[in-house]
Image (cartoon, grey):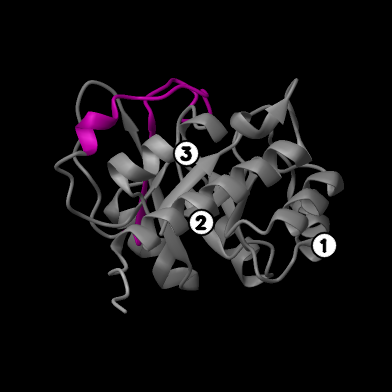
Amino acid sequence: MSKVKICGLSRLEDIDAVNSALPDYIGFVFAPSRRRIDQATAAVLKERLDGRIAAVGVFVDQDVETIAGLYDSGVINIAQLHGDEDDGYIMRLKDCCGCTVIKAVGVGDALPQLPENADYLLFDTLSVQRGGAGKSFDWSLLKSYEGLPYFLAGGLDAGKISDAVRRLDPYCLDVSSGVETKGIKDAGKIQEFVNLANSIDLLNWCDIIPEKKE
């Protein structure tokens, strides 16, 4: 059953919205982006976050020590890497703090060479801004993929959930702009996205349960 991640939270109102909807993950962006926040803001937001939700820090070529500091202080639970971080970098980060690592992979016309030392991959549309473009890539490129569990990102919104889950069954659906209105997180859209993802999973689960015989 696909999990849900709401990425790019920056306000206390965003935290209140996800605390109500209860996705599995949220994302704090520390990389250059209009959704970027600093460490002090992230600490305040994390303090307010429901403990059932894991906080993911989004980075681009950040030094290992900075990420480890955020992890050790409890501001983030997971590191999501969108830069040129290779398997060696991932192992240095894990050796430094032991955090779970999601490695983002930009998808263009084909799947690139994939890292091996991450815990999860995140497939997103290839873009100069290293993710967050709000556009989908060709999902058929993942039809034969057999590897690490992955987060699916890139242009997702409530209207694409059913297709994504039924065609690909990703480990997690990752959404940001698809739950925004005029560039601001929309509590209603967040709730709708989480509700629909849960209902699609329930329908898929019911489909595989054998009909009870009288």
Residue 90 vs 9, above or below: the answer is below
Looking at the rendered structure, the kind of residue marked 3 is: Ile
Q: Residues within 10 Å of mark 2 (few under 14, many from 20)?
A: many
Question: Residue 181: image x %, image y %?
Answer: 74, 25
Q: Residue furthest bottom?
A: 214
In the rendered structure, which segment of residues is drawn in magenta? 118-142
Residue occupying image coordinates x 32% and y 79%: 214
Question: Residue 150: image x %, image y %?
Answer: 35, 51
Front residue of this view, candidates 199 and 114:
199
Front residue of this view, candidates 112 and 197:
197
Q: Residues within 10 Å of mark 1 (few under 14, many from 20)?
A: few
Q: Quadrant of the N terminus?
A: bottom left
Residue occupying image coordinates x 45% and y 30%: 154
- Which of pointers 2 and 1 indicates the residue nearer the eye? 1
Looking at the rendered structure, the kind of residue marked 1 is: Arg
Left or right: where 183 falls relative to 100: right
Looking at the rendered structure, the kind of residue marked 2 is: Ala
* Chain-order first, disc 2 or disc 1: 1
Residue 63 appearing in the image: no
Q: CA distance from mark 2 to mark 1?
A: 19 Å
Q: Which residue is mark 3?
A: 161
Q: Principal SS element in the magenta part?
A: loop
Residue occupying image coordinates x 29% and y 25%: 138
Q: Which residue is mark 1?
A: 48
Give me the disc on residue 79.
2
Q: Quadrant of residue 148?
A: bottom left
